[in-house]
Amino acid sequence: MLKVYALIIIVGILGGVAYGAKYYYDTTQATIATLRENNAQLEVAVQISEASMQVLQENMQKFQELNNQLQQDLQAAEAYGDELQGKLNRMDLVQDALRDAKTLEGKMNGATAKLWRGITEDTGGDGSRPLPDWLQSDSPSGTRDQSGNQIGEDPSTNSEQTQASSAQ
Amino acid sequence: MSRPKPAQLNDVRVYVVNQRILEDFLVEFKQRHGEVAFVALSMQDYENLALNIAELRRFINQQTQIIIYYEDAVAPEPEQNVDTALEK
């Protein structure tokens, strides 16, 4: 009878140990699975984060380039106004008019026509429309000047800044 | 959104007159326009007018450049998003 009790106790102990081992195994596997899943999620999160950083850096570079270009364009828009002011400071229109009014008039009309066409182009239009008739014909007044040259400017030169100053 | 239509500007004729050719100018002007009535500007005022127009043109050009800047800034770029970055 004592042997039976001892056997029962031993079997119970062995069963307990086996159950504990099984429990430990199951919980460990579950923990490993959870950790593996978390790791995968973290890897995806890291990839997304790195991709976001890359996009941000690309955007920063793009905006830097756009800003630089904008500053250059804004400066370019200032340039011809400054040049016009400088030329007007160097010239004496009164003396030019007293010396040869018709030549000055021709240059003014040519430059003025060029200015309007320049502004039309600036606003997206076609600036190649025909010149007015007083610039197309040899009028007796001698006002013809199709070159659009700026007043006081050498006719042989082709200054882009003429457009800005061509209101003269 | 489309841009505003381009400026359609009319040609303007300028007459430069001094004391020496004033009489001839009046005769020729009356023949061409029928009446002797015109707007006169001193050279200084003409310079001011030219500078004013240049200033307006500068403003127009700078506004246009700023519009182009924003158009480029908000333009969709399919290559620049997280999904495609991930695919890389």
Image (cartoon, grey):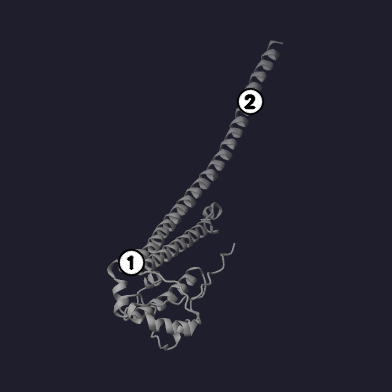
Q: Which numbered circle lies on residue A18?
A: 2
- The amino acid at mark 2 is Ala
A84 lies left or right of B37:
left
Label 1 element class: helix
Badge 2 density bin: few <14, some 14–19, many ≥20, Cα 10 Å: few
What residue is disc 1 on?
A: A83
* Horizontal and vertical percent position of residue B40: 42, 71
> Which is closer to the viewer, label 2 or label 1?
1
Q: Which mark is residue B34?
A: none
Q: Chain of mark 2?
A: A
- Give the mark nearest the N terminus, 2 or 1: 2
Q: Amino acid at mark 1?
A: Glu
Q: Secondary structure at mark 2?
A: helix
Which residue is at the far right? A1
* CA gap, disc 2 and disc 1: 97 Å
Residue A77: image x %, image y %? 40, 63
Q: Nearer the viewer, residue B60 or A103?
A: A103
Give the vertical position of A52 relative to A80 (above or below).
Answer: above
Q: Quadrant of residue B15?
A: bottom left
Report the chain holding disc 1.
Answer: A
Q: Can I make out residue A153 in this image?
A: no
